[in-house]
Image (cartoon, rainbow, N blue to C red):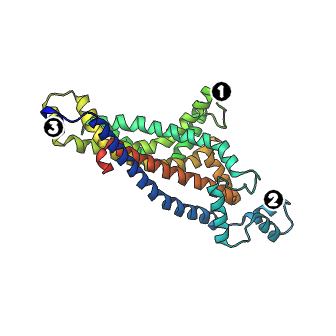
Amino acid sequence: MSAGGSRPPGWIAEARGDAAGVLRRYLARRLLVAVPSLLIATAIVFTLPRLIPGDAVQLMLAETSYAKDIDELRAKLGLDRPFHVQYVEWLGRAVRGDLGESLWTRRPVVAELGQRLPVTAELALYATLIALLIAVPVGVLAAARQDSVADYVVRSLAILGLSVPGFWLATLLIVLPAIWWGWRPVTGFVEFRADPLGHVGQLVLPAVILGIASAAALMRLTRGMLLEVLRQDYVRTAWAKGLAERAVVVKHGLRNAVIPVITLLGTQLPQILGGTVVIETIFGLPGVSRFLFDAINQRDYPVIQGVNLLVVSSVVLVNLAVDALYAVLDPRIRY
């Protein structure tokens, strides 16, 4: 150590290296925990479609002349083998990226998902962004103006947003403007290459409907956590120093209140994805969720399994990303 008790050169780099190593070990542990969860989810994903009433083979024979005998078609599709054998074979193919073929379109499930996934992903992204753009500023305003008229109005709107079903709101927004003003939102699908503005515009209304419930929940939590943080001693000290309101609320308050909000945001993803099933059907969007809806009606097992596996994997990855954000926002979590 040099004279005067100063730290040796390079101590900052060493500290950063230690912090990065701790972060990597933390993420590695979280990843190991996610693997068993994903394995259990695959068993559930494979089992549940077969509990749906009805038989895919009988439906196919009722509508087509694909085969003359039920047993022959069942053997051709591999549905006559023991359940555990089917599961092991499907899991082995899924690990290699092969989710089988659709029983109805006769196309690989991966190709079908690749064609429809961008629509659903874009819709879910817009819904998440809209929820955040509504929830965080409104929640901060409600906390900073506690028990004011604005606070009461915002809390009432949040309860309304949580109470109104998305499919009901979507139906009203399609039917009522058509009756009153002769206007209806764009239904069907417009490719981005054909009309970029029309492509984005057709997704705005469905994204707003999907994001309302999430925005209401996030806003209530943002308000509650920020109120709790603003009562802490260090925030009172910041007020006593004469800092501006924006600096106290945003820099000292919101940053320390945001971790529970991120947790709730991670749990909102499955709800947003679940809501796309009805929204895509109502607005005629050719996404993964509408594909899943049609597959359930047709008992298309490979498609149902493939879509559910995709959703489960996405949720696991989002949870890992949320855990990583924890460690970045609050270094104490790494230890």
Could you say whether the residue bearing mark 1 is in a helix, strand or loop? loop
Does residue 217 appear in the picture of this structure? no
Query: Residue 224's image quarter?
Result: top left
Confirm or deny contact between disc 2 and disc 3 (CB under 8 A). Answer: no
Tell me which numbered mark, 2 or 1, is placed earlier along the sequence: 2
Disc 1 marks which amino acid?
Asp
Q: Mark 1 points at which residue?
A: 195
Does 69 appear above or below 97?
A: below
Q: Relative to the observer, which residue lies in front, 229 or 323? A: 323
Q: Around disc 1, counting alpha carbons within 10 Å, would you say few (fewer than 14), some (14 to 19), or many (20 or more)?
A: few
Disc 2 marks which amino acid?
Glu
Q: Which mark is residue 236?
A: 3
Which label lies toward us, 2 or 3? 3
Residue 11 locus on image (x, y percent): 27, 37
Disc 3 marks which amino acid?
Arg
Q: Which mark is residue 63?
A: 2
**Side of 313 where 9 appears, left or right:** left
Confirm or deny contact between disc 1 and disc 3 (CB under 8 A). Answer: no
Q: In which quarter of the image is the N terminus?
A: top left
Could you say whether the residue bearing mark 2 is in a helix, strand or loop? helix
In three-dimensional space, the C-alpha distance between marks 1 and 3, rounded to whole angstroms, equals 53 Å
